[in-house]
Amino acid sequence: MEVGERLRKLRTSNGLSQRKLAKMAGVTNGLISMIEQGQTSPSVASLKRILDAIPMTFSEFFSLEYPGSEEVFFEESQLREINPVRVFRVDNASNSLVSLRQVGDASKHSLQMLHETYAPGSDTGTEMYSHEAEEAGIVISGEIEITIGEQTKTLKKGDAYIFDSRLPHRFKNTGDDECVIVSACTPPSF
C-alpha cells in the first residue's frame, strides 16, 4: 500500500478531515491532499510531522497491515520498506532516493533495525526531524553527512554514530556513490 493510501485510511479512521490533520501537523491541507492522491512524496520531516499529530511512529504507520508473526529470521526480500514508494524527494529531484528497509515488525519489539540506502545527492530533507529514541548506525559503504543539532560530520565506510534522537537531525549523501547504513533505534519511534 502506498504512503498516500495509508495516510488517507489512517486520517479517515481517526475521523479527521484533510484540513484538520494539516492544522494539527502544521502543514498545508494541499500537502495532505497531494500525498493522499499520490502526486507528491513527503519529506521525512513532513511525514514525521503529520504522523506526530495523530500520534504515530513511522514504524507503526508502515506496519498497519503487516501480517503478525513470530519470525526471527528474515531473507533480504522480507525486509519491509517503510517508505513503499522508495523516495523522499529532495528539492523536487526525482532521482534522490532514500530507502529505509525495516527488519520485522518493530511495533512488536523494543528495537527497530533498518537497512538504509541513500542514492548520491539524496537526503532526508532540508528540514531536520527528531523523535523519542536513541539511534546508532554503521556506514557499510559510501559516505554520509550527518547533522545532529549544531554538529555536522561526514562519515565513511566503517565509521559509526550514536545519539539521542530527540536532537534535530538529518542525513545527506554528499558522495558520488550509494551509501548503505545499518542502523538501530530504541524504542522504535521512527
Image (spheres, rainbow, N blue to C red):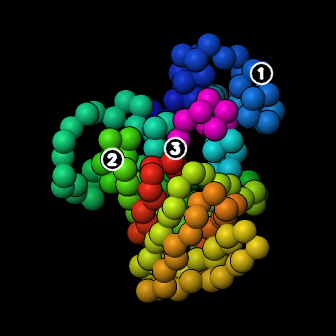
Disc 3 designates what residue?
58
Which is more N-terminal, label 1 or label 2? Answer: 1
Mark 3, residues whose alpha carbon is within 10 Å: few (<14), some, or many (≥20)? some
- The CA span between labels 2 and 3 is 14 Å
- The CA span between labels 1 and 3 is 21 Å
At which x and y percent is residue 38?
Answer: 62, 34
Please say if 125 is above or below 174.
Answer: above
Residue 45's tag is: none
Question: Dot 1 lies on which element?
Answer: helix
Q: Tell me which corner region of the image, top left, top right, bottom left or bottom right, holds residue 50.
A: top right
Disc 2 designates what residue?
109
Q: From the image, state whether disc 2 or disc 1 is nearer to you.
A: 2
Q: Tell me which corner region of the image, top left, top right, bottom left or bottom right, holds residue 16.
A: top right
Which is more N-terminal, label 3 or label 1? Answer: 1
Q: What residue type is labelled 1?
A: Arg
**Front residue of 133 and 82:** 133
Q: Quadrant of the N terminus?
A: top left
Question: Dot 2 lies on which element?
Answer: loop
Mark 1, residues whose alpha carbon is within 10 Å: few (<14), some, or many (≥20)? some
**Contact flag, marks 1 and 3 (Cβ < 8 Å):** no
**Front residue of 153 and 93:** 153
Disc 1 designates what residue?
19
Q: Tell me which corner region of the image, top left, top right, bottom left or bottom right, holds residue 150.
A: bottom right
Q: What residue type is labelled 2?
A: His
Query: Which region shows up in magenta?
Result: 50-58
Mark 2, residues whose alpha carbon is within 10 Å: few (<14), some, or many (≥20)? few
Q: From the image, state whether disc 2 or disc 3 is nearer to you.
A: 2
At which x and y percent is residue 114?
Answer: 41, 59
Q: Any magenta on residue 5?
A: no
**Contact flag, marks 2 and 3 (Cβ < 8 Å):** no
Whether residue 41 is visible, yes or no, is no
Whether residue 92 is visible, yes or no, is yes
